[in-house]
């Protein structure tokens, strides 16, 4: 059988859609197959009561990479949404990320100097403890958090949330997870340090539609249900599904965290006054509540829609059949993944890309950057 496409792309998330877009631009015939009933992977939104509901978890686009920002803006414009989550600990409210507003709420301090003194005392206690145990670098998330912000913030804003999110004790988690959270001595509630952020105007589906415009796509099409047929359609495959599944779990299953979403429609225009409220205490079973309309409506425009959609997120251990969301990059999983990656590196006609195929805790912008680079390299070397 003569292949009818140059590239078969398995998965229509941001990696697959970006790769397909670049290849199609250069005249390559692409087919994108998607096992779900819709395109877009985890950035897909469902419209409910005129509100774009982030069906697979809240997604905020942010980057400092100008070429990625220019690329996505060539497809769709972005609004001015700035992520400024609030933490609710046993009814007390704190601003995130950790900044002067948080320190004022935690300790009543009003100047950077006062905050610094408290943090420094608590950091020093943590450093002394670590050194008494014979190590100079943090070996787990708890130590990393304690030397970053001290025990008060760790105990109220980090420990409970992290242990709910990952289902593991902070002493059993890698330090890198928490390193990305900014700590600032300014009154700045912007969760990200990046130069650019926002939500695509009209929702993420517009971004995906723009990327896949003019490209053949098939939904409800699982690569593994008819592998030989799909493989016969193209010489080259771009695979964005789970890497362990591609190799029939021969080295064992990789572990993920998944999230159960519980959405409700409320008959009020504004339920919590913010898109994201994290519940950082262990006694509340969910990690956060998302109120979706705040991603796209600002100020009094909130009242244009009399209802609101809110989603509680419950973090859980992944079991086969559930959606794999967050790779668990601990030692055991990284070792298994290295064995799969070794096989993948030997493939001549398969490119593995994206969060599941690379088993990597990836944000959207780096996924797009990687897909652009991989596609451009592929096109050049072809
Ligand atoms: P995916 O979006 O997972 O796409 C993979 C696609 O492949 C899926 O559609 C899947 O159905 C399909 N597929 C898998 N197997 C097969 C098969 N056998 N046959 C056919 N199709 C298949 N990033 C940010 O930058 N900001 C955020 O705020 C943010 N929030 C997040 C919140 C949550 C809960 C999660 C889980 C992630 C978040 N991310 C965020 C990360 C972001 O979702 C990813 O970086 C990005 O979506 C990854 O794109 P991808 O194409 O690699 O994977
Ligand atoms: N985190 C926390 N308290 C919070 C928010 C985040 O302790 O209120 C920790 C948690 O361990 C999380 C990590 O910081 O896994 C990274 O947070 P981020 O919001 O970047 O995670 P995401 O949900 O985007 O993966």
Image (cartoon, rainbow, N blue to C red):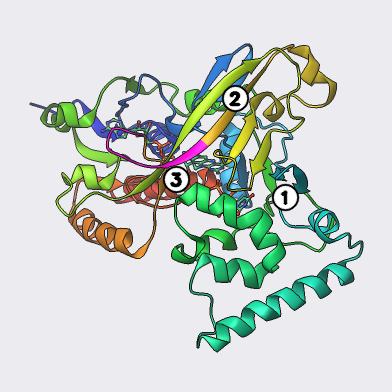
Q: Residue at x 70, y 60 (%)?
A: 153
Magenta residues span: 314-322
Indicate the secondary structure of the residue bearing disc 1: loop
Residue under numbered circle 2: 203
Indicate the secondary structure of the residue bearing disc 2: loop
318 is within the stretch colored magenta: yes
Q: Which residue is drawn at 22% across and 60% down?
A: 339
Tag shown at residue 178: none
- Marks 1 and 3, the one that precedes in the sequence: 1
Pick the front one: 271 or 89: 89
Decide if residue 278 is on the left or right side of residue 256.
right
Tag shown at residue 372: 3
- Marks 2 and 3, the one that precedes in the sequence: 2
Residue under numbered circle 1: 96
C-alpha span from label 2 to label 3: 22 Å
* Picture quadrant of ligand 1: top left
């Amino acid at each position: 059988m003569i292949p009818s496409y140059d590239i078969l792309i398995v998965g229509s998330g941001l990696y697959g859609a970006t790769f397909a877009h670049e290849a199609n631009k250069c005249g390559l015939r692409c087919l994108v197959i998607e096992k779900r009933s819709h395109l877009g992977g985890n950035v897909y939104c469902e419209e409910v009561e005129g509100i774009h509901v982030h069906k697979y978890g809240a997604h905020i686009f942010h980057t400092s990479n100008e070429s990625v920002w220019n690329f996505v803006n060539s497809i769709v414009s972005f609004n001015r949404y700035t992520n400024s989550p609030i933490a609710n600990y046993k009814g007390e409210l704190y601003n995130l990320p950790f900044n002067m507003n948080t320190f004022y709420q935690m300790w009543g301090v009003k100047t950077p100097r006062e905050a610094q003194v408290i943090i420094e005392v608590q950091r020093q206690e943590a450093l002394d403890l670590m050194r008494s145990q014979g190590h100079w670098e943090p070996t787990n998330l708890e130590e990393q958090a304690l030397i970053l912000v001290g025990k008060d913030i760790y105990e109220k804003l980090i420990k409970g949330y992290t242990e709910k999110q990952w289902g593991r004790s902070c002493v059993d988690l890698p330090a890198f997870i928490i390193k990305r959270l900014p700590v600032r001595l300014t009154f700045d509630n912007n969760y990200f340090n990046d130069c650019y952020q926002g939500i695509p105007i009209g929702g993420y589906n517009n971004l995906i539609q723009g990327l896949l415009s003019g490209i053949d796509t098939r939904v409800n099409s699982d690569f593994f249900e008819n592998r030989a047929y799909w493989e016969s359609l193209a010489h080259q495959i771009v695979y964005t599904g789970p890497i362990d599944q591609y190799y029939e779990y021969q080295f064992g299953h990789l572990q993920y965290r998944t999230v159960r979403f519980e959405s409700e429609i409320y008959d009020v225009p504004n339920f919590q006054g913010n898109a994201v409220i994290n519940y950082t205490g262990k006694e509340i079973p969910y990690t956060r509540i998302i109120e979706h309309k705040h991603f796209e409506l600002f100020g009094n425009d909130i009242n244009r829609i009399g209802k609101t959609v809110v989603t509680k997120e419950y973090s859980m251990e992944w079991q086969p059949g559930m959606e794999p969301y967050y790779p668990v990059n601990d030692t055991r999983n990284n070792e298994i993944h290295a064995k799969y990656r070794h096989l993948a590196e030997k493939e001549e006609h398969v490119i593995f890309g994206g969060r599941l195929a690379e088993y990597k805790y990836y944000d959207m912008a780096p996924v797009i950057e990687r897909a652009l680079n991989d596609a451009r390299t592929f096109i050049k070397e072809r």
